[in-house]
Amino acid sequence: MKLKKILPVLFLFMAMVFNGYTQGCAEPSSDEGVSVFGFIQPQLEIGFTDPSTSTFSFERARLGVMGNIPYDFTYYVVMEMSPFLSEEVPYPILLDAFISYTRYDYLKVSMGSFKSPFGLETNTPCSGLATIYRSKATLELNAPFRDLGLMFLGGSRETMLQYSVGLLNGTGLGHRDDNNFKDIVGRVGVNPLSWLHVGASFKYGQSASAAGLADPDIRTRLGGEFDMNLNGRLIVQGEYIYAKDEGSSIVGGGCSGGGEVVLGDKVRSGGYVQALYNLSYTIQPVVKFEFYDSDSNIKNNEEFVFTAGLNYFFNDWTRLQVNYRYAAEMPVDMPNDQLVLQLQVKF
């Protein structure tokens, strides 16, 4: 979408009076000076495949700095050092690096590299995910998670409305824009009750034709979400994403970009529903059901994953997650269930 067509939409969002959606993997610090933070997630992966697999790895190993500069500016920088998160992107890599103007709660502005403001699961802090892995629908349909650009945001879960809208390259991390178009991405949330959040997201972008044609490739995304927190005990969340690609589509990529470009038009969709229950301050069982359709033109093409897990909190900084993932594909179900144990420490 050309810049002159996007600006009126941006100013419409800016005029609405809605603290903002998470842009990275931790909340920005309000203290002056430099605050060093990070987390590591070593894990054991056991695959019930044929033949079976077993390996230790790091899902994430991140180190960052953030802080506040008088007056009204904050900064946030995060590096990813795990070599296992993506095979397409070399590590270490700069993930988030943005500066924000934060004087007004209802209108903040950020510029740099940050998470795309699309979807609930994408914008859940990486160290706060209920399950070890994000759903396949999120990984496939919202890639790249991070991009470079400009974002306007405002409101919080404590206000009736919250929003974030961004003007992004659309090319992912570490890449200059390859055309004169910019992706426009937005997310709006409504909190009608103290325990209920509902929201919607959209993304529209154009890129140079992967097939070398005159017309650009077009990507459209629509999403819906809900989050219910009942008395701090039972938490139920869900999300649905619809994706339409014209000219080409990206398979994979996820958090760090990369992915494979596939030529041709395609319509995909997917989502998840998950429930957590806090039995105590330390024990939290979780169940998650996710579904993904990689091409709506092909019948019996769905994939389903059921995750049964247990989160154990040793303290506020240390957590053990155990997930058993039962996977089923149509039309042929492959033996690919998985048991994953992850220990996380935040600092």
Image (cartoon, rainbow, N blue to C red):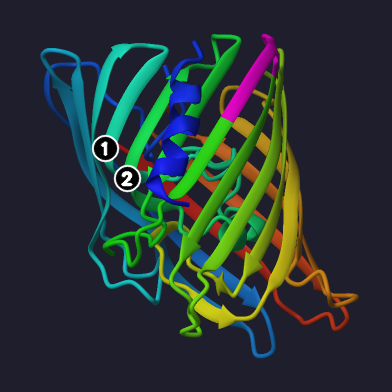
Residue shown at 44% from the left, 21% from the top: 14
Q: Based on the displayed image, in which of its 4 quarters is residue 251 positioned?
A: bottom right
- Asked if labels 1 and 2 touch by Cβ distance under 8 angstroms, the answer is yes
Can see residue 307?
Answer: no
Q: Amino acid at mark 2?
A: Gly
**Local SS, label 1:** strand
Magenta stretch in the rendered image: 188-196
Q: Position of residue 309 (x, y in %)?
A: 68, 48
Instruction: Name the residue beneath numbered marker 1.
Output: 111
Q: Nearer the viewer, residue 324 or 4?
A: 4
Q: Nearer the viewer, residue 217 or 276?
A: 217
Query: Tag on residue 315?
Result: none
Residue shown at 47% from the left, 73% from the top: 259
Instruction: Name the residue beneath numbered marker 2.
Output: 149
Quadrant for the C terminus in the image:
top left
Q: Based on the displayed image, in which of its 4 quarters is residue 33 positioned?
A: top left
Q: Locate residue 196 relative to residue 99 in the image: left or right.
A: right
Q: Nearer the viewer, residue 81 or 313?
A: 81
Q: Is residue 230 above or below residue 244?
A: above
